[in-house]
Image (spheres, grey):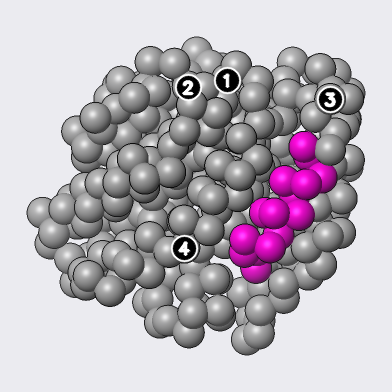
Amino acid sequence: MSRYRKALPQLTGGLFLTDGGLETTLIFHDGLELPYFAAFDLLRRPEGRDTLWSYYARYAEIARAKGLGFILESATWRASSDWGELLGYSAEELAEANRQAVALLHDLRLAFETAESPMVVSGCIGPRGDAYDPKHKMTSVEAEAYHGRQIAVFAESGADMVTAITMNYAEEAIGVARAAAAAGLPSAISFTVETDGRLPTGQTLKDAIEWVDGATRAAPAYYMINCAHPDHFAGALTGQEAWLQRLRGLRANASRLSHAELDQAEELDAGDPQELGQLHGELRRRFGQINVFGGCCGTDHRHVAAITEAVTGTAQAVA
């Protein structure tokens, strides 16, 4: 069932989109309850599957209309064993939820993919602990064992790749990258940063990326940044060093609020979609290797559409 596992099309330089803030859209726009931010739990019911289909379809249609590639990211950010146990899932029930999440993406690809818009199926990995506070850190060996179970299901289900979203310390990212490589899946590692452009541990993006590459023989296919506003990380992207060339994707927040402020917010801060798009256009002009664009907390299809307009308007001006 895998189509692009051996040759990810986003590595050839074309522009690719992905979705926005899945969980914040479902909670604040669709009025759904998501215990522990676990979108995969919707797959328990047929109407939940329909909700997820409609969510992804909005973004896939944007990509197809523009003739851009699209990365279908599974709704499994919380579908690892600790979170599954909190939600009352047995090990087999959790594995089946991960299978269903990937199967949904295969069906979406069948419905929306064209020759001009290749659609990559990605199994989404989330952090074992709190995405904003790495107070219970694993060693890389522990992280490989923990995340390896979910990654094995993705491999068996025909995912093209694994994307680790909202990684907040390097050891966990190393474990994910090693587990993905052992399963024969390419991986993308997406770090989150605080308002100072550093990981929640205080480590710089440069050091984190170089550490993961050094510990895994550069196993990740590429790196990303997510769950931060461009104002938080743009200043950290300077120079022409090799680590910057490893950065290929952005999934920014709509809001300029810090992680601590977002954690306490009772209302959605959707920011300004057009401004967010303009900021991405500026980053695309500065860093032509960045070619995967989507959103994170507070963003929806309006933000991704604005980002698309901005980055396609600058596509001819970059290498």
Q: Quadrant of residue 17?
A: top right
Crowd tier of the residue under label 4, counting other residues whose Cα lies within 10 Å: few below 14, some 14–19, many 20 or above: some
Q: Which residue is mark 4?
A: 55
Question: Label 1's element?
Answer: helix
Identify whether 287 is placed above or below 146.
above
Name the amino acid, label 4: Tyr
> At 37% from the left edge and 77% from the top edge, which residue is drawn?
35
The boundaries of the magenta stretch are 297-312
Chief secondary structure of the magenta portion: helix
Which x, y percent locates residue 275? 86, 59
Q: Is residue 166 visible?
A: no
* Residue depth check, mark 3 versus mark 2: number of the one nearer the observer: 3
Identify whether 267 is placed above or below 224.
below
Verify CB contact (< 8 Å) between mark 1 and mark 2: yes
Question: Label 4's element?
Answer: helix
Rendered image: mark on residue 316: 3
Which x, y percent locates residue 12? 60, 16
Distance, label 4 to label 1, CA atoms, is 26 Å
Q: Earlier in the sequence, mark 3 or mark 4?
A: 4
Q: Is residue 5 visible?
A: yes
Distance, label 3 to label 4, CA atoms, is 30 Å
Q: Which residue is mark 1?
A: 11
Q: Earlier in the sequence, mark 4 or mark 2?
A: 2
- In the rendered structure, does residue 202 fall within the stretch colored magenta? no
For this rendering, which residue is in front, 8 or 132?
A: 8
Rendered image: mark on residue 165: none
Name the amino acid, label 3: Gln
Q: Which residue is mark 2?
A: 8
Q: Earlier in the sequence, mark 4 or mark 1?
A: 1
Q: Earlier in the sequence, mark 1 or mark 3?
A: 1
Name the amino acid, label 2: Leu
Which x, y percent locates residue 63? 59, 43
